[in-house]
Image (cartoon, helix red, strand yellow):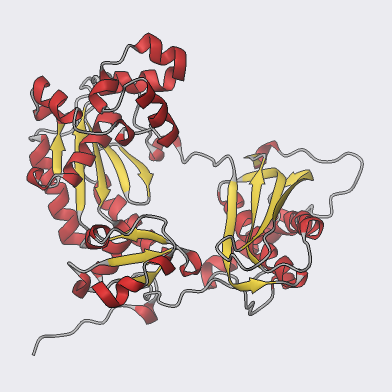
Amino acid sequence: MSPPSSSAPPIFALIDANNFYVSCERVFNPQLEKKPVVVLSNNDGCIVARSQEAKDLGIRMGEPFFRAKHLIQSHGLIWFSSNYTLYGDMSARMMALLGSFAPQQEIYSIDECFLDLAGIQQDAVSYGQTIRRRTRRYLGLPTSVGIGKTKTLAKLANYLAKKRPQYGGVFDWQACEPLIEDYLMAQIDVGEIWGVGRRLRMQLRVMAITTCRDLKYAPTSLIRQRFGVVLERTIAELNGLACLALEDAQTSGEKRKQQIISSKSFGRPITALADLSAAVLSYTARAAEKLRQQDSICSHVVVFIQTNSFSTHQKQYANSITLPVIVASNDTRRLSAVAIMGIEKIYRAGYSYKKAGVILLGLHPAAQQQGNLLMADPYARTSKVMHIMDHLNQKYGANTLSLAGAGLQPHWRTQAAQRTPNYTTAWDEIAPAYANR
């Protein structure tokens, strides 16, 4: 690969793993190929990933699993509990491989990333096919590649590469004549454009802007007046003017999250305050760990609880509360004390709770922490204690060291009745190899 010229305009490529969670499962079980497969959310509640065969059966993303269970018998639907340890490791391997194809990479999500192919001395479509073949050969993951002069066009090209088999999994806008480009954009709903959500799509349709081509040629002054500069930039990107630069995590560092959420549904309904408090303590510990990973502290804690909204024969209740942290912190003990105060305030007896969680707000760098002049800090040695706690949990496994209030064997833990092994991260769960005889 030849080094790119510093003056070369950007050429963005978006590489996306197809049906990522399902594809990860198929890597270690090839018998799942060409069969309808779904992966479920925490607690085996909703469908969060579908193979193309499952999509063809009419299964929708986010659909409660109980509504699709009849397809197990009638159409051979196969399901798995989510295994985020496996998916996260496969994602890391994929991103490392894809990063070798270009000097700059932006990891956009667990299953997709942008590359800048500017200066690559090879036909872009051929190079995209090389990326696909190597990812499939090295990791077993099928991918689609979209290429364009802007990130918005690359996302749209990826949509065409995935939806239209005639392109062989790679589509490049630069290979199109202007008339062909407009023809293709006229066939794509405006809601498929990166950054155009359901609400914005409805508002645009009222203005008779229903396709990508319609938005491409919409009057920018009117769009800016009604929707702001962000959508105006989208129009510029659709016309090939790059407004969004590639964010290189290796040079700029990962962005700090503005809020951290830790929440799960329970393995079975909870009625007692003690069990609910134990769950909230566990979630707070996980959120605090994520907070320390990005070297931040938080000033407010939100605690929320809710019953099962799908259960029509039970009383319904949901509530939340936001409490300040007197001295902003990332100490699990301090944040847990605030969270327990919150759960005690919003708890109501007589209900069967299905879900709880915490949200950490008011996040800022730990270096900006301010003390309290009016009281001594009982957590003055907090950084050393938390460092030891994180180190032990990372080395020996999650919850090796935890708060006593969270319990040792909580019965409310998430159910995962059909989770596959951690093939790539645990020696005792490594996939077996069978020799042909």
Quarter where residue 230 is shown: top left
Q: Is residue 92 visible?
A: yes
Q: Residue at x 33, y 65 (%)?
A: 38
Q: Residue at x 61, y 55 (%)?
A: 287
Q: Write the residue at 7% across / 45% down.
A: 166
Q: Residue at x 46, y 69 (%)?
A: 44
In this view of the protein, which residue sits in the foreground, 138 or 263?
A: 263
Above-or-below relation of 306 to 100 = below
The residue positioned farthest toward the top in the image shown: 221
- When the figure is inspected, residue 28 is found, relative to residue 56, above or below; the finding is below
Residue 423 in the image: state x and y as whole percent.
33, 73
Q: With 110 as the anchor, is 11 left or right in this view?
A: left
Point out the image quarter for the C terminus. Answer: bottom left
**Nearest the camera: 148 or 297?**
148
Q: Residue furthest bottom?
A: 437
Q: Position of residue 322 (x, y in %)?
A: 74, 46
Is 343 located above or below residue 367 in the figure? below
Q: Position of residue 263 (x, y in %)?
A: 59, 58
Q: Is residue 275 left or right of residue 101?
A: right
User: Residue 220 at x, y = what percent?
Assistant: 35, 12
Given the current orientation, which residue lies at the most extreme front position? 313
Q: Nearer the viewer, residue 244 or 305?
A: 305
Image quadrant in which you'd find residue 26: bottom left
Is residue 403 in view? no
Q: How many marks are shown on the rendered structure?
A: 0
Q: Is residue 31 left or right of residue 109?
A: left
Q: Quadrant of the N terminus?
A: top left
